[in-house]
Image (cartoon, helix red, strand yellow):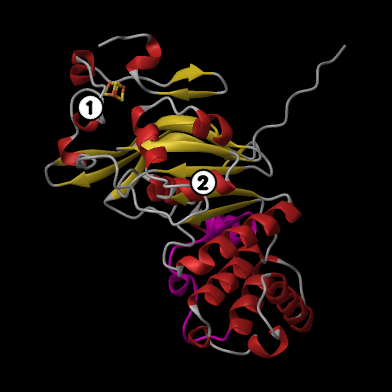
Amino acid sequence: MLQAVPAPPLLDVKDLTVQIDTRRGPLLAIDHISFHIARGEILGIVGESGAGKSLTGAAIINLLTPPIRRIQGEISLQGARIDGLSIQAMRELRGKKIGMIFQDPLTSLDPLATIAQQLIETLRAHLPLSPSAARARAIGLLREVGIPAPEQRIDAYPHAFSGGMRQRVVIALALAAEPELIIADEPTTALDVSVQAQIIELLKALCAQRGASIMLITHDMGVIAETADRVAVMYAGRIVEIGPVAQIIQSPRHPYTQGLMGAIPSLGADRTRLTQISGAMPRLTALPEGCAFAPRCTKAMALCQTQRPSLTPHEQGAAACFLLEGATV
Ligand code: SF4
């Protein structure tokens, strides 16, 4: 009997490596990372500033600019490679198949164009719609993202909206062409704490309705805990732990993930920044020879100073720490 071939993941990233060319030589900003996102899944990418989270998102949609460049890795969407696409083909893919939401809504919106102009242009760039049909659809999208009186507000300029309302408009723009994947890079960091949860809930609900997947990039483990299905924890350009959120929250295996978990006072309450892990992430110019987390790790062993741990499978996930390989202090 013929066996069914399993469907490829929506997004498959293999061995992604990103380099920054400097006068003193190349630096590895993303160091051979691999992960996938299933259809309808929310994958959280979490870590401190400088861990390589945003660069990972930018590398997927080919938004890296010199001196930063992808030097290795295969990126597939729905089973088809997208890492070798022309600039034009990638531009069409962005928006149509992959929607993007960035931290500051003002970077995604043109201050000199009305919301109607921006939404209608995006809709008509990707879908065969007449101007009046695109306007009707744009109003429907604004209603869906919770903009009150969208028939009137659609003709306003971005500055007439609050930060939270602007990010709702950006979500409408990102979803306009019904993409399969949304890459959301710190989508609530610039917003008032009181609206952050609303925006995340909205994004989650709208993607669930459409069966779209989300790659949610954030420094906030609390957001991941409340939102994502799986999480990849990044540190100094590498994935140090990956797995289902429930498993990682209950028993984080990597000392860095344990530190991130400790930085959430209580889920749903006020969140703090990642202040409970002493020290700072090493600069790319000064990565230690062994485990990059060793200078901050309370469990570091002699082995950790000279050798780098690889991801070791554990339950339904994996972590890169010698403790998982049975090493003892
Ligand atoms: Fe700590 Fe060593 Fe594990 Fe790195 S490999 S996280 S230094 S115990």
Q: Quadrant of residue 255?
A: top left
Drawn side of residue 227 relative to residue 301, left or right? right
Q: Quadrant of residue 244?
A: top right
Drawn side of residue 242 relative to residue 9, left or right? left
**Is 213 or 253 nearer to us in this picture?**
253
Secondary structure beneath label 2: helix
Q: Residue at x 57, y 64 (%)?
A: 199
Q: Residue at x 77, y 80 (%)?
A: 136
Three-letter code for the amino acid on which mark 1 is drawn? Ala
Q: What number is the disc on residue 222?
A: none
**Place of residue 142 in the rendered image (x, y in percent of width and height, measured from the top left):** 68, 76
Q: CA distance from mark 1 to mark 2?
A: 25 Å
Distance from mark 1 CB to nearest ligand 1 atom below 8 Å: yes
Q: Is residue 310 visible?
A: yes
Reading the image, the residue beneath label 2 is 224
Vertical placement of residue 254 versus 169, above or below: above
Badge 1: few (under 14), some or many (20 or more) residues near its Cα, within 10 Å? many
Q: Which residues are magenta?
A: 88-114
Three-letter code for the amino acid on which mark 2 is drawn? Ile
Reading the image, the residue beneath label 1 is 294
Vertical placement of residue 197 versus 54, above or below: below
**Is 114 or 307 nearer to us in this picture?**
307
